[in-house]
Image (cartoon, rainbow, N blue to C red):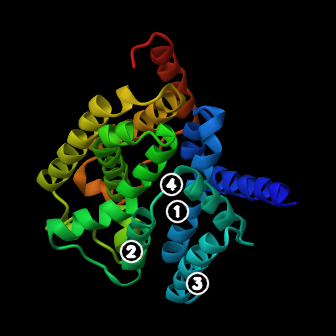
């Protein structure tokens, strides 16, 4: 039965989310049930592509990514994939009319991680972030507005800015692994071997501007089904940024900032109070 197979596929994407990211899984659980499954499906797809380029060092990553990409497009055409992650993502793509342009831009940035180690211009940097993060925000927005193109266009810029903010926080948090393990440097014109306070503050100021824009022009205007879940993710990343801001630039390369589970629960409780009091 195709319906049963689809349900198994959705469960696989949910499991991927839960195993790979407790924070994203927590935020997704705060979404309304009718959109939650689709967000799990999106996360499963982007997580697998990201794992190929970041983790599978003992395998031919280029061949794996090429096969993953070809399987996606051929399976989309056929309407089914025996890869449950692709099968669930295809269902969400078709249901919410997620364009090949968004998927293609994402896969292009993932492919860049196979060979590009340094971003020296603002243009390269923005193009990578657009493909690796902004389009993921846009895919999620497609789900949140459920086909309402007017609302999608109104919230599009904010969704991209929120995706950018999340990605830049990840870059700053993961500087050590990206630079020393994966040999990547995303921030243009920043010497990671001698990261100074001025460079760090410039990056943080840029992220804060993205967050402010996304909150005022996007999160506050989201449909009720999505608002609280997205707000939780926003609060989590804002807390990460606060901890990064308090960490001396000389120490950022020596540690990986994390949010403890008790702090996540605290953020959830305080955010829920704000939500119920209609402060967001």
The tag earlier along the polypeptide, 3 or 4, is 3
Secondary element under disc 3, as helix, strand or loop, is helix
The tag earlier along the polypeptide, 1 or 2, is 1
Please say if 70 is above or below 273: below
Disc 3 to disc 4, C-alpha distance: 23 Å
Q: Position of residue 53 (x, y in %)?
A: 49, 76
Direction from residue 56 to residue 12 in the image, left or right: right
Q: Position of residue 231 (x, y in %)?
A: 44, 31
The tag earlier along the polypeptide, 1 or 3, is 1
Residue at 47 percent across and 38 percent down: it is 145
Q: Position of residue 208 (x, y in %)?
A: 24, 40
Q: Which residue is mark 3?
A: 67
Q: Which of label 3 and label 4 is nearer to you? A: 4
Q: Are marks 1 and 4 in contact (CB under 8 Å)?
A: no
Q: Which residue is mark 2?
A: 108
Please say if 197 is above or below 245: below
Disc 1 to disc 2, C-alpha distance: 12 Å
Q: Local crowd at mark 3 within 10 Å, few (<14), some, or many (≥20)?
A: few
The tag earlier along the polypeptide, 1 or 4, is 1
Residue at 16 percent across and 57 percent down: it is 196
Direction from residue 4 to residue 185 in the image, left or right: left
Q: Which residue is mark 4?
A: 97
Q: Which residue is mark 1?
A: 46
The answer to whether residue 127 of the structure is visible from this angle is yes
Q: Position of residue 86 (x, y in %)?
A: 64, 67
Secondary element under disc 4, as helix, strand or loop, is loop
Q: Local crowd at mark 1 within 10 Å, few (<14), some, or many (≥20)?
A: some
Return the residue nearer the eye: 20 or 81: 81
Q: Quadrant of residue 238?
A: top left
Disc 4 to disc 2, C-alpha distance: 20 Å
Disc 1 to disc 3, C-alpha distance: 15 Å
Residue at 53 percent across and 33 percent down: it is 264
């Amino acid at each position: 039965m195709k319906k049963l197979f689809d349900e198994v596929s959705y469960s696989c994407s949910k499991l991927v989310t839960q195993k790979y990211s407790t924070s994203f899984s927590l935020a997704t659980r705060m979404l309304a049930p009718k959109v939650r499954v689709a967000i799990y499906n999106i996360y499963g797809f982007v997580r697998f592509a990201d794992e190929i380029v970041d983790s599978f060092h003992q395998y031919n990553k280029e061949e794996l990514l090429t096969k993953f990409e070809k399987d996606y497009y051929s399976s989309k055409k056929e309407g089914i994939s025996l890869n449950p992650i692709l099968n669930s993502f295809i269902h969400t793509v078709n249901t919410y009319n997620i364009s090949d342009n968004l998927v293609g831009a994402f896969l292009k940035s993932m492919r860049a991680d196979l060979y590009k180690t340094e971003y020296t211009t603002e243009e390269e940097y923005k193009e990578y972030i657009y493909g690796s993060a902004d389009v993921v925000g846009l895919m999620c927005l497609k789900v949140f507005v459920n086909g309402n193109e007017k609302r999608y266009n109104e919230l599009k810029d904010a969704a991209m800015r929120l995706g950018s903010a999340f990605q830049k926080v990840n870059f700053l948090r993961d500087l050590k692994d990206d630079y020393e393990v994966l040999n990547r440097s995303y921030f243009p014109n920043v010497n990671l071997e001698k990261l100074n306070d001025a460079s760090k503050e410039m990056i943080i100021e840029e992220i804060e501007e993205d967050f402010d824009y996304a909150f005022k022009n996007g999160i506050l205007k989201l449909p009720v089904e999505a608002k609280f879940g997205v707000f939780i993710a926003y609060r989590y990343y804002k807390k990460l940024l606060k901890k990064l801001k308090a960490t001396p630039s000389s120490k950022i390369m020596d540690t990986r900032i994390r949010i403890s589970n008790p702090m996540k629960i605290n953020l959830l409780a305080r955010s829920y109070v704000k939500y119920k009091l209609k402060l967001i």
